[in-house]
Image (cartoon, grey):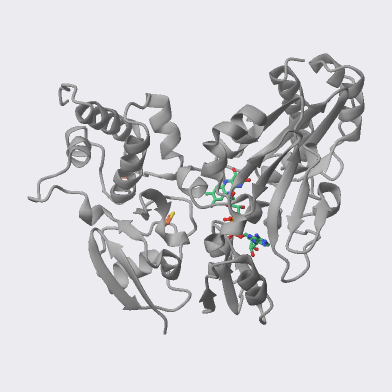
Amino acid sequence: MYDFQYVKPANLYDAVAAMGSEDAQALSGGQTLTPTMKQRLAQPGTLVDLTGVPELKGIEVGPDSVTIKAATRHVEVERSAELRAAIPALVELASRIGDPQVRNRGTIGGSVANNDPSACYPAAVMALDGVVVTNNREISASDFFQGVYATALEENEIVTAVRFRRPDSASYQKFVQPASRFALTGVFLAKFGPEARVAVTGASENGVFRHAGLEQALSASFTAAAADPVAVSADGMIQDLHGTPAYRAHLIKVMTKRAVQACGG
Amino acid sequence: MPSVSMVVNGRQVSGEVEGRTLLVEFLREQLRMTGTHVGCDTSQCGACVVHVNGESVKSCSIFAMAASGAEVATIEGVANADGTLSVLQQAFQDHHGLQCGFCTPGMVMSAADLLKINPNPSETEVREWLEGNICRCTGYHNIVKAILSAAATLRGEAVAAE
Ligand SMILES: Cc1cc2nc3c(=O)[nH]c(=O)nc-3n(C[C@H](O)[C@H](O)[C@H](O)COP(=O)(O)OP(=O)(O)OC[C@H]3O[C@@H](n4cnc5c(N)ncnc54)[C@H](O)[C@@H]3O)c2cc1C
Ligand code: FES
Ligand code: FES
């Protein structure tokens, strides 16, 4: 790993200022960035540790929405009773990320900023009509996630929070890739009135996406059987040693049906 | 070089580090506390698990500077003050929870964190908790037995050694 200057600002103002220095990069839980730097795939000149910024921590549950600040760790989401009452599927999702030590460090801000094609949170942000809040704007989920490891973030921009709309019901079904513990394919389903939203992670070569066909079918009839006739194409699905495109396409439907059943449909 | 100070196993320590110095490097190479192991160096294996402010974390994926001012606990601090093994360590011995022993420091530190949060875990909970600790020797069964047995002992229940 190349050396760098480590700074740990104590408030958001100082963090934004520090991100303005040359080759600065944000450090949150470090569960992705540290291994990346060891491989020399990232070489920041200054690493701005965001975990000491109080404005970036906490969970706020409102009547229509839930806001999770960026430096909130997976373990805090997993153990939040308030959040479990509001959106239990989010708590379930966090509790199945990686392992306990990863959850003790990894954060939601790092997860969405990284936009790993197999990460769990991006699917939740898409399905729950989420908004990514930064130090200078709000970005809707569909504008934020722009393909594999690509997001709408400008250089030096800091994710400060993620806001989710509260659904009537929701479920995250993850088919675990047992070596990495990421999703081999995962489906986040959310229901808002008659509208069903189906977001898929781990499957597409273009990263997280919503499946229009499944959404249409489930919005018309919220039953597992309604998913059966929907064509899920294997075009553009990931091919690797863990699964073929056809296998992943098949999993999308299986995971969607399980999610519908978990939502009582 | 920036200097860093923290409390390790109750002792105030400090040293000069680079930004890139990992917590595990600070422990092993500067403090010469080599009980914490590096198995994979890619955040997968859990051989490097220590506690930072009471929570188990992988010390190969935290910079030493990020642990500045923290309370760190390592395997060297686990035994009783008189040098005898702690209940958890003794259970690993009694139940043959180790063979080569490479994963053991991480296993013990990870399990200690679990028993603090959940003094009465089910077998499934123990196995799920050990998701991030890889053992190439034992096949895990005896590690799980050791942790369940230590949990029972710590709850004050009588347990028969195997
Ligand atoms: C063994 C293992 C298993 C895992 N399993 C899963 C899994 O099952 N599901 C899953 O979803 N994830 C998994 N992860 C990833 C984990 O969730 C990471 O915590 C997450 O991807 C990154 O979060 P972080 O806080 O560690 O970010 P970091 O590693 O600190 O940062 C990641 C990237 O985001 C940037 N960044 C961080 N915070 C901000 C911010 N506030 N604003 C702007 N940019 C920012 C950094 O510059 C960096 O580029 C796993 C990781 C490991 C090591
Ligand atoms: S050495 Fe840290 S997880 Fe393997
Ligand atoms: S005892 Fe050898 S790796 Fe676990």
> Which residue lies most toward the bottom here?
B1
Classify the position of the N terminus of chain B by image quarter: bottom left
Q: Which sits in the foreground, B156 or A213?
A: B156
Report if residue A41 is visible in the image: no
Kindly indicate the quadrant of the structure image that contains residue B85. top left
- Position of residue B33 relative to residue A177, above or below, is below
Compare residues A205 and A239 and report the one nearer the observer. A205
Viewed as shown, does residue B24 lie left or right of A1?
left
Report x, y in % for residue B95: 21, 32
> Where B80 falls versus A16 (above or below)?
above
Residue at the front extreme? A63
Q: Quadrant of the C terminus of chain B?
A: top left
How many marks can you see?
A: 0
Could you say where residue B41 lies in the image, as x and y percent from the top left? 45, 60
On screen, residue B128 versus residue B103, left or right, reads: right
Residue at point 70%, 59% (across, down): A159
Q: Quadrant of ligand 1?
A: bottom right
Image coordinates of residue A170 in percent, x first then y, are 72, 27
Q: Position of residue A224 (x, y in %)?
A: 79, 17
Q: Nearer the viewer, residue A80 or B124?
A: A80
Furthest toward the left, the residue is: B82
Indicate the quadrant where residue B91 lies: top left
Q: Is residue B158 visible?
A: yes
**Residue drawn at the location 39% of the way across and 48% of the way down:** B55
Residue located 59% across and 51% down the image? A107
